[in-house]
Image: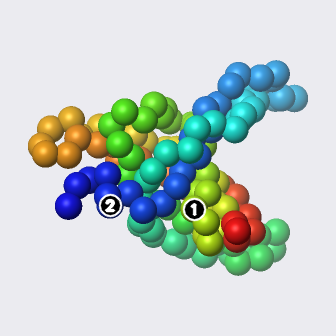
Amino acid sequence: MSFASLLVHSCRIDRGVPGMPDRYGHEEKTYPTGETVPCLIQSVRGQEIEGPQLGGQVLADVRIFLQNSVTLAEQDHVVDVTSGHRIDTYDVQFVEMWDYGAAPHKEVLARAIETGEVSG
C-alpha cells in the first residue's frame, strides 16, 4: 500500500497574503482560495472551552498528512473540502518534513478555527 493511497481526504491549501494593518498595528492576512491536494486528517485532541461568551465551544487540534511536494508554511490555512465532510478550516501551527524512509511526507499540526456546513 502506497503512502498516496492513504490520503483519503481532500484539503485546500490557502496561503496567507499580507494585507493592511488592523487598528492595533498588526498585519491582517487574507487567504485567497488555493489548490486542492490529497491529504489525511486525524484528530489529535478536542477540549471544550467554557465561558459566558463561548457557549461550550470545542477547541480541536488535528494532524494532517500531505505529500512532500505540497508547499505549506505556518499560519497558512488548510480547508477540509472532502465531499460529505463538514467544511472545517484549520490554522497551520507547525510543519514537519519526513524526508527519509520509504514514504517522504509532511506532517502538519493545526488547530480548527472555523466549522462550516457539510459539503455535497
Q: Is 80 placed above or below 78 here?
A: below
Residue that sits furthest to the right in the current view:
23
Q: 23 left or right of 63?
A: right
11 and 27: which one is in front? Answer: 11
Question: Label for residue 12?
Answer: none
Image quadrant assignment for residue 23: top right
Give the quarter of the image for residue 97.
top left
Does residue 10 sit above or below 84 in this rendering?
above
Question: Which amino acid type corresponds to the residue marked 1 in the rendered image?
Answer: Thr
Q: Is residue 31 left or right of residue 35?
A: right
| Residue 109 visible in the shown view | no
Give the amino acid type for the residue marked by disc 2 in the picture.
Leu
What colour scheme was applied to this rendering of the protein?
rainbow
Q: Secondary structure at mark 2?
A: helix
> Any mark on residue 82, and which?
1
The answer to whether residue 88 shows anywhere in this view is yes
Q: Which residue is mark 2?
A: 6
Distance in Å between CA atoms under marks 2 and 1: 14 Å
Q: Is residue 104 above or below residue 43?
A: above
Question: Which residue corresponds to the image point at 62% horizontal and 72% vertical from the top-left?
Answer: 84
Q: Is residue 52 above or below residue 35?
A: below
Residue at 52 percent across and 55 percent down: it is 10
Task: Name the quarter where the C terminus is drawn.
Answer: bottom right
Q: Of helix, strand and loop, which one carries label 1?
A: loop
